[in-house]
Amino acid sequence: MSKRKLTRQQRWRVEKVQAERTQRAHSKDKKAQHALIEGHLDEVSNGLVTAHFGRQVEVEATDGPHQGKRQRCHVRANVESLVTGDKVTWRPALDELQEGVVEARQERKSLLARPDMRGTMKAVAANVDQLLLVVAPEPEPFANLIDRYLVAAEDSGLEPVLVINKWDLISQGQVSPVISQRLDSFLEIYREIGYQVLATSTQSEEDLRDLKQQLKGQISVFVGQSGVGKSSLINYLLPGVDLRVGSLSEDSRKGRHTTTTAKLFHFPEGGQLIDSPGIREFALGYLEANALAEGFREFRPFLGLCRFRDCSHQKEPGCALQSAVAEGKIRQQRFDSFLHLLTSL
Ligand SMILES: Nc1nc2c(ncn2[C@@H]2O[C@H](COP(=O)(O)OP(=O)(O)OP(=O)(O)O)[C@@H](O)[C@H]2O)c(=O)[nH]1
Ligand SMILES: [Zn+2]
């Protein structure tokens, strides 16, 4: 192919197109570019995404002169998608009423995802350390539901902690001995597996002490079935905070915009909470059968030991899980729950 000599006019046009393309590539978010040009930004520092609004995020400075302050931010076009809890490198605006710019996302420790309306898994929160699975004597817990949450937590890399709320009902003998007994043996199973179990109630300060201790220095989420007392617990732990996730408007001209995205809060006595209606209902989305078995913590030593590599742990001879159940190394109830979840995949 011969090199054609371009006329000055053509060269000018090529250069112009090139420049425009570069401009577009570098500044998909024009406002971010604009902010940089305007020079109203401070030095690069570390931050934490505390909320998400469409293409903007709210970032809290975790070091530097703005530490503890929050700002709305534009996100550079080359930054991968952000969720609440993400740690970022950003440039705060010098004037806190202006908007900062997120330059990069830092590595994630864990990612909590939940299925959207079409069943596609959507990331909702990053770097959550522990999942507080709230249960109560009433509504009485289903083993299956607890196990679903536990598997989801294990799969997302979060440490689950079982929180038995409404403990006052038990300690004051307000639930029938049958329910009380059932709950006890239930909890014993989870303790035996190695999960931490805490008793709480929203009826006295004393009953929240262990939970407050557990929250310190960690990013937590509260999950559990309706009516167990998640809202009550969170209201006690975050006094005076407007928990309505829609309380920050996306755009004041459009009025109050209710967003269901997750928000990050600081507990006054230490630790952080990420909360949204979606997170509270977080359970099991799509899972591979292997991930399901892995999610039953006490099954792990036996996985891969079945006679058949593709053992479904149902009726096959030489199934290591079934032998473990027969030998009392795996509780029958957990195995039944596993099979139930397996058939509902
Ligand atoms: N006795 C007793 N009742 C409680 C306790 N905590 C919450 N409740 C009551 O349990 C009911 C449900 O509490 P909520 O905080 O709304 O429960 P939730 O888990 O947030 O429920 P959803 O909003 O439906 O998900 C309310 O009537 C509370 O007053 C507790 O520790 N002891
Ligand atoms: Zn098997």
Image (cartoon, helix red, strand yellow):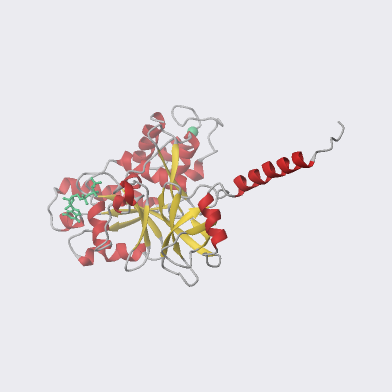
| Number of disc labels | 0
Instruction: Tell me residue 286's x, y (percent).
Output: 44, 35
As displayed, is residue 243 above or below residue 6?
A: below
User: Vertically, is 334 above or below 133?
Assistant: above
The residue that appears at 31% across and 51% down in the rendered structure is: 245
Residue 211 visible in the shown view: yes
In front of the other: 9 or 99: 9
Q: Position of residue 265 (x, y in %)?
A: 35, 60
Q: Nearer the viewer, residue 264 or 139?
A: 264
Q: Residue at image x 37%, y 61%?
A: 272
Image quarter where the N terminus lies is: top right
Residue 120 at x, y percent in the picture: 44, 35
The answer to whether any part of residue 106 appears in the image is no
Q: Quadrant of the C terminus?
A: top left
Question: In the rendered image, which quarter is residue 145 located in?
Answer: top left
**What residue appears at the point 23 percent right and 51 percent down from the top-left corner?**
229
Residue that extends furthest to the bottom in the rendered view of this protein: 65
